[in-house]
Amino acid sequence: MFVISGDSSSEIKEWSVDCFNTSPDARVFFGSVKACGKGISLVGASRIIILDVHLNPSVTRQAIGRAFRPGQEKKVYTYRLVAASSPEEEDHMTCFRKETIAKMWLNGASIVLSEDIKALYKR
């Protein structure tokens, strides 16, 4: 089992990532979205379980991207665990709406009206 956090030194992060990616016995790698968001490659992973909700969807996508690299053929499954009826659920929904709006614009949805976008923010 390997663990990195924002407090982990760069040497510990590098050692943990290298051991995890090369060991056939490595099973679990714990890392916060922030700690795993930049500068590491977890190509040894097959499952990602996101426990913390970040309000910026690109931060979460970037952390997921650490395990699934371009050209990789192995499947990587991602799970988000969110506590129901909690402030965390509200944060998750805010993040989901942000992702939806970005996808609408990036996919060239020219028929999207401003009222459609406003409806995404209504509760």
Image (cartoon, rainbow, N blue to C red):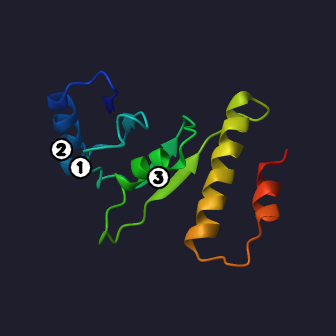
- Residue beneath label 1, please? 21
Q: Residue at x 54, y 36 (%)?
A: 51
Quick check: 48 above or below 32? below
Label 1 with label 2: CB-CB less than 8 Å: yes
Q: Residue at x 62, y 41 (%)?
A: 81
Q: Position of residue 39 (x, y in %)?
A: 25, 44
Quick check: 40 above or below 113? above
Figure quadrant of the N terminus: top left
Q: Nearer the viewer, mark 1 or mark 3?
A: 3
Q: Nearer the viewer, mark 2 or mark 3?
A: 3
Quick check: 99 above or below 9? below
Q: Position of residue 118 (x, y in %)?
A: 79, 55
Name the kind of residue labelled 1 in the image. Asn
Query: Of all residues shown, which one is farthest toward the front?
Result: 114
Q: As rendered, which of 115 and 47 lies closer to the eye?
A: 115
Q: As rendered, which of 64 and 79 lies closer to the eye?
A: 64
Q: Position of residue 59 (x, y in %)?
A: 46, 45
- Residue beneath label 3, please? 61
- Residue beneath label 2, please? 18
Relative side of 83 to 25, left or right: right
Q: As rendered, which of 69 and 2 lies closer to the eye?
A: 69
Labels in figure, total = 3
Figure quadrant of the C terminus: top right
Name the kind of residue labelled 3 in the image. Arg
Within 10 Å of disc 2 (Cα), the crowding (few <14, some 14-19, many 20+) is: some
